[in-house]
Image: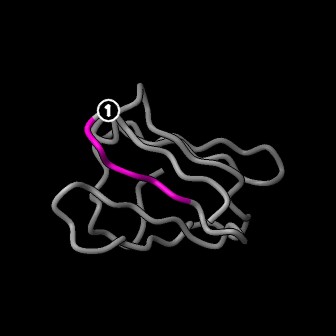
Amino acid sequence: IISQIRDDDGAYLAVSSRGNFFLTWEPGNDFWIPHNRGTPRRIQNMGFVEGDINKGVWMTLNGGKLFICYSEPDLKADTFDF
């Protein structure tokens, strides 16, 4: 894990050390849920839109790309709609 961030409601978002995938966890979950990055570029960092996972997440990739998912992400889905 290269980065881990917590939102105001206790949900977590973590990026794998190689940037291949990311993980999410919400209070009440028994385990972390892995998600594919959805692009060939590696993830550099991720965060929450306005500090709340329900408002969306952002992701930066190597090469300077920035993706933002403004809709509430489906935390059980394999990939997010960026």
Q: Which residue: 65% across, 41% down?
A: 66
Above or below residue 28? Residue 64 is above
**Identity of the amino acid at label 1?**
Asp
The magenta span reads 9-14
| Left or right: 26 as drawn, with respect to 6 | left
Above or below residue 14? Residue 29 is below
Which of 25 and 65 lies nearest the eye of the viewer?
25
**Is 12 a magenta residue?**
yes
Q: Position of residue 59 (x, y in %)?
A: 59, 47
Q: Which residue: 36% across, 71% down?
A: 32
What's the coloring here?
Answer: one colour
Q: Position of residue 49 (x, y in %)?
A: 43, 32
Res 50 quadrant in image: top left
**Is 10 a magenta residue?**
yes
Q: Position of residue 39 (x, y in %)?
A: 63, 66
| Left or right: 51 as drawn, with respect to 62 | left
| Left or right: 54 as drawn, with respect to 40 | left
Which of 41 and 44 lies nearest the eye of the viewer?
44
Q: Residues within 10 Å of mark 1 (few under 14, many from 20)?
A: few
- Residue assigned mark 1: 8
Q: Which residue: 32% across, 40% down?
A: 71
- Tell which residue pokes out farthest to the top in this image: 50
**Number of numbered discs on residues:** 1
Q: Position of residue 48 (x, y in %)?
A: 45, 38
Above or below residue 51? Residue 3 is below
Q: At numbered mark 1, what does the secondary structure look like: helix, strand or loop?
A: loop
In which quadrant of the rendered image does the N terminus lie? bottom right
Q: Which residue: 72% across, 64% down?
A: 42
